[in-house]
Image (cartoon, rainbow, N blue to C red):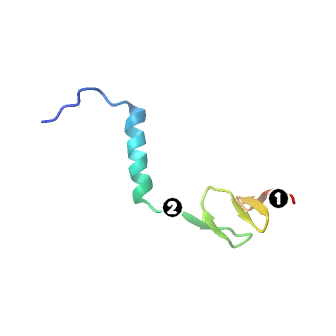
Amino acid sequence: MAHPKRRISRSRRDKRRAQYNAKTKAPAVATCPVTGQSHHSHRAYWFEGSLYFKGRVVMTKEK
């Protein structure tokens, strides 16, 4: 039976598991009730020169 020579820390173990989950699972897509735009959930997104987050305008692009 294989035995590890050194103990693997929690952070190293969790980093490895996070990479596996990121590759296998598709990102969650949500639809904004205000703009109707589809975007990744829990992320801000640009729509017609404005940055939206949780259905609110966070920032507007200056020209």
Q: Is residue 18 above or below residue 1?
A: below
User: How crowded is the residue under tag 1: few (<14 C-alpha within 10 Å), some, or many (20+)?
Assistant: few
First reached walking from the N terminus: tag 2 or tag 1:
2
Q: Is residue 33 above or below residue 20?
A: below
The residue singled out by tag 2 in the image is 27
Q: Residue at x 18, y 31 (%)?
A: 3
Q: Residue at x 68, y 57 (%)?
A: 44
Picture quarter containing residue 6? top left
Picture quarter containing residue 24? bottom left
Report, in whole angstroms, how far the alpha carbon at label 2 lies from the one at label 1: 26 Å
Farthest left residue in view: 1
Q: Residue at x 79, y 62 (%)?
A: 50
- Where is residue 30 shown, x and y percent of the image? 60, 66
- Say whether residue 6 is left or right of residue 50: left
Q: Secondary structure at mark 1?
A: strand
- Say whether residue 38 is left or right of residue 4: right
Image quadrant occupied by the N terminus: top left
The residue singled out by tag 1 in the image is 60
The amino acid marked with disc number 1 is Thr
- Residue 55 vs residue 7, the one in the foreground: 7
The amino acid marked with disc number 2 is Pro
Q: Would you say the residues marked 2 and 1 are in contact, meaning their CB atoms lie under 8 Å apart? A: no
Image quadrant occupied by the C terminus: bottom right
Residue 2's mark? none
